[in-house]
Amino acid sequence: MPASAKPETNEQSVKRSQRRRAPAGAAVLQEDVTQAIRAAVFAELAAVGYGRLSIEAVAKRAGVGKTAVYRRWNSKLPMVIDVVSVVAAQVTPVPDTGSLYGDVRDLLEAGAYALRHPLASQIVPDLLAEAARNPDIARTLESAIRDTQQNISTVVIRNAVERGELPEDTDVDMALDMILGPLYWRLAVTRGAVSSDYLDRLARAATTALAAARV
């Protein structure tokens, strides 16, 4: 080191080392790549199911290397749960129509759309079957989906309470079961038809039951 040069501080040394090891932007996860991988996961789930799904197949379908997938998720379970959670949140926006009936009707409409989607109709039963065999999948899947739906229901019930349509002690979990349970049974279990009139009647029934039951 030249006699006139000042000793390098620890902070300067760390910064210089970071610049040498990681080029600018190298650690940034590109959102378009993440979206491509999520779409590939969704398609692979519909094509082969959770049991046969592989990181390699997802990466190939997304047009990326396996490293890009592993940067985001360390195994296929958190990867699948993330995709399911994101899709659930996207197709079920928080309704705010100004009435409990309107909010419940919107929730049912969004739920029916999601459950009738060709890919979702294949993926949901498969994941539930896997959950029945694997407690880890069951716990993680329940938590991910339940948290998403519960957050939405909490807002809906809170708004209804503030408008005086429901009592303050209304049980959000029970309310969620009463709203979406019958719809799931009809679409995912019995595979029955769901018309706009059916959703209207189901929304009225759920709203009346919530107000009367004081759950």
Image (spheres, rainbow, N blue to C red):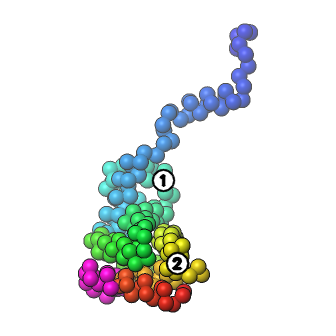
Say which label, 2 or 1, has the lower sequence index.
1
Of residues 144 and 76, the one drawn nearer to the viewer in this rendering: 144
Name the quadrant containing residue 18. top right
Count of labels in the image: 2
177 vs 87: above or below: below
Residue under label 2, please give it.
Answer: 164
Q: Residue placed farthest to the front in the image?
A: 164
Which callout, 2 or 1, points to the residue nearer the camera?
A: 2
Q: Quadrant of the N terminus?
A: top right
Q: Which residue is found at the position 51% from the left and 41% from the top?
A: 27
Q: Residues within 10 Å of mark 1 (few under 14, many from 20)?
A: few
Q: Position of residue 119 (x, y in %)?
A: 30, 69
36 vs 44: above or below: above
Which SS does the magenta portion mostly show? Answer: helix
Of residues 105 and 42, the one drawn nearer to the viewer in this rendering: 105
- Horizontally, residue 79 falls left or right of residue 113, namely right
Q: Residue placed farthest to the bottom in the image?
A: 213
The amino acid at mark 2 is: Gly
Q: Which residue is found at the position 41% from the left and 65% from the top?
A: 93
Q: Which residue is found at the position 74% from the left and 9% from the top?
A: 3
Q: CA distance from mark 2 to mark 1?
A: 44 Å
Tell me the magenta residue range: 185-201
Of residues 28 and 162, the one drawn nearer to the viewer in this rendering: 162
Q: Position of residue 42 (x, y in %)?
A: 35, 64
- What secondary structure is found at the residue carrying circle 2? loop
- Horizontally, residue 158 falls left or right of residue 204, namely right
Residue under label 1, please give it.
Answer: 72
- What secondary structure is found at the residue carrying circle 1? helix
